[in-house]
Amino acid sequence: MDVVTLEGFHALKHALRFGAEIVDVAGDPDEAAKLAAELAPDLTLPPIRREPGELVTRARRPHVDVAAALRRPGPVVYLEGPRRLGNVGAAIRVAAAAGAAAVLTSGDSDPWHPVAIRGAAGLQFAVPVARVDALPPSDRLLVAIDPEGDERPVPAHAILAFGSERYGLTATVLEAADARIRIPMRPGVSSLNLATAVAAVLYGFTERA
């Protein structure tokens, strides 16, 4: 689908800041202008059709060249088969804030679904985001974030693989990984929320290039 739906002012704000092609905006123009003056005075809002309810934006989904995205500086976040769209969005939000090179997902959860866009506050436009059938070939190290891994820093120029909320990483990814690294946790705590795990690794354990 070429056009995606963004809900709320923050998604519109980030879409505008990061160069999205806006197709249509509907909502309360006066309320949007008030929020823009308070939260985003650097932006000029597009015309807004007056309609009741929350601000809803339709924007053109950017084409992502995965091979080019893999050549960008910074770590690549790979979410293997995530199940919850809200987690996908929150992980994208963290990755954009941390300066990740790209976010790739596999499985059925579309990272451009409106629920994922809401969870990311529209920051899909700030970092290349794409759904792939499998990990593409790359010269990057593949690092599996796994409870059975070692505790050590994560290379900056790596693909960081995070498993699904219920099942973790598949045997295919674990066997292909160049390293397995775990997040230190207090005894008795078995796991972290997917987006929290992404945040912990990007901010706490990834080496700076």
Image (cartoon, grey):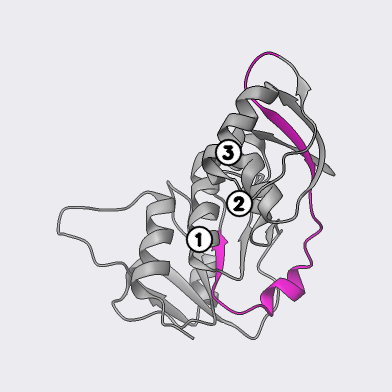
Residue 84 visible at all: no
Query: For residue 148: magenta?
Result: no
Residue appearing at x 57%, y 51% in the figure: 81
Residue 94: x and y in percent read 48, 57
Give whichever of 132, 113 is nearer the camera: 113
Name the residue: 64% across, 58% down.
126
Q: Amino acid at mark 1?
A: Ala
Q: Which is more toward the observer, 14 or 60? A: 14
Mark identifier at residue 199: none
130 relative position to 87: left or right? right
Residue 209 appears in the picture as rendered = yes
- How crowded pointer 1 is (Cα within 10 Å; few <14, some 14-19, many 20+) is rated as some
In the image, residue 59 lies at what x, y percent?
Answer: 78, 41
User: Going from the N terminus, do you reach mark 3 or mark 1 first?
Assistant: 3
Residue that numbered label 3 is attached to: 37
The amino acid sitting under disc 3 is Ala
* Residue 107: image location, x then y, percent: 64, 50
Q: Which residue is mark 1?
A: 97
